[in-house]
Amino acid sequence: MMPILFPSSFLSLLNSNENKYFIHGIASGDPTENAVIIWTHINTNFNGDCKVEWQVSTDKNFNNEIKKGFVATSKARDYTVKIDVTDLKKNQVYYYRFIYDNAVSDIGICKTLPDSAVKPLQIAVISCNNYEDGYFTSFRHIAENPEIDYVFHLGDYIYEYGTGQYCNKVFLEQSHRVNDPMHELVSLSDYRKRYALYRKDKELQKAHQHKPFICIWDDHELANNAYKDGAKNHQSDEGNWTDRSVAAMQAYFEWMPVRAKSASEMIRSIKIGNDANFVFMEERLDGRDKQLLSNDLGKQSPDRKMISYKQFKFLSDELKNSNARWNFLVNPVMFTGYKSKKEEAVKEEDWWTGYPYQRNRLIEVFQSLKNPPIILTGDHHQSHVLELYAKNQMSKENFAAWEFLTPSITSKNDDRLSEEKIIKKSEMLYKLNPHMVYNNIAAHGYFILKVAQKEINIDYKFNQDILLPNGGENNGPQFTIDNLNNLTKNV
């Protein structure tokens, strides 16, 4: 009797629970109307090329497989796999998986972009997930929310510090959630290991598995307070800054589901028909001059740049030429700014307010638009809703934009103050800043941006306790901007 021969794809399905090669999960990102990036990593000690199969289907059982292929990966790309799947249908949910050596990855879910907001789309806006500051449970909440279509990650996906240098020390001692490597990241190997550590986190894996991410970076993917020629956290004994930043970017492009292959390609826009236009900005390596102290008169110079002249023109043209009802700046660091007691001390200004000439030129662009833009901002670790006015004069004719700051997933804010001090500081911020619509200085989480044709909504979601591995989620305030540019809130 002749033996029965099964195709390798069938054998692989029999071993679908053998995921030893896929311990870093799967991910999708940078969707367009007809394409999406899918990603995985092969966990292996093999030194040669690995041939990996990928499959895309319209159903989770892969009965209607529409795309498949093979791709080789190797040590040169840290055994990461990234496929740009094209010729897809708009606003369509797809399922994808990878197969290597008869082992099958988990099944991922991705979605292409729509060409309108006739059916509102919902986007989780997040930033700042520090491994040694708390558990990433907000990522699970995002994964399990069926209403969320996409995730915008606004930077500080990893932190470059050594163990214990920037953390919640009590949490670190109790959780043993320790960085790998334990020293500060400098080399390509260092950055790769840190991404590998983060991508082992099950909550983060679940979010990547269920939602497509659209990402920008901030400074900690490089080093604290990075700029084009260096960083506050880059010292002379840590080698050449260019070498370090190139290594950091290479690891980012290997481990993140982004289409870009250079810093300049991170600057891009996403259009949802005539309804929404999102402009993603790069504010570290593309032209940023070194930060100056708050009392340094040199920061007023018209030659100082937060972004390159080329990026400034791109942003200006995107806004002025946009026919979209809603225009968004997807922005790594705070634009509007506010007063606090901390500003009485001399400090290094890393915000847009530290680059006043270029900031004012952008405000002029905002005021020339038919409708004020909405700035979506990360980095700050706290929740703030701010109204931006030209010349710091609060009048209707000087109104320029709204800014919504998402809190951190885990990174430190004022969460370690007593409840009494938190309330007192929050009240003080309102008194000092009449343009501040809302603040929450101690909660962690994210917000959901809901974009419809005639209004947008911002719903804040707060983690109950990032120090607990299964922390729940509380609903925060909700904000609405209607078609007449009126902002209303439920707080």
Image (cartoon, grey):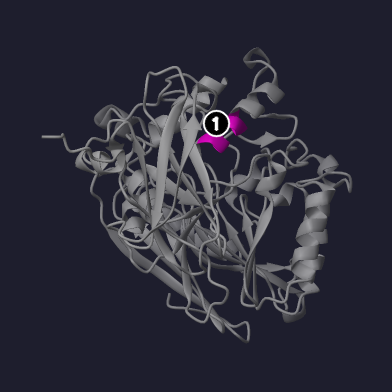
Q: Please give the name of the residue rendered at 76% of the width and 47% of the height, measured from the top-left corner.
A: 307
Q: Nearer the viewer, residue 442 or 335?
A: 335
Q: Residue 350 in the image: x percent, y percent? A: 67, 43
Q: Is residue 104 visible?
A: no
Check if residue 249 falls in the magenta segment.
yes
For the residue marked with disc 1, what is the amino acid?
Ala
| Residue that badge 1 annotates | 251
| In this picture, residue 63 sits left or right of residue 315 | left
Q: Is residue 11 visible?
A: yes
Q: Please give the name of the residue rendered at 32% of the width and 34% of the height, measured from the top-left corner.
A: 23
Residue placed furthest toward the front: 1
Q: Quadrant of residue 394?
A: bottom right
Q: Please give the name of the residue rendered at 64% of the width and 12% of the height, measured from the top-left corner.
A: 237
Task: Work out whether 472 lies above or below 54.
Answer: below
Q: Quadrant of residue 296?
A: top right
Task: Work out whether 436 lies above or below 302.
Answer: below
Magenta stretch, residue numbers: 248-254
Name the image quarter holding the C terminus: bottom left
Residue placed furthest toward the left: 1
Q: How many marks?
A: 1
Q: Nearer the viewer, residue 448 or 418?
A: 448
Q: Residue 205 in the image: x percent, y percent? A: 35, 44
Q: Residues within 10 Å of mark 1 (few under 14, many from 20)?
A: many
Q: Please give the name of the residue rendered at 29% of the width and 55% of the height, measured from the top-left corner.
A: 464
Q: Secondary structure at mark 1?
A: helix
Name the image quarter holding the N terminus: top left
Task: Work out whether 267 lies above or below 19.
Answer: below
Residue placed furthest toward the right: 302
Task: Work out whether 225 lies above or below 444.
Answer: above
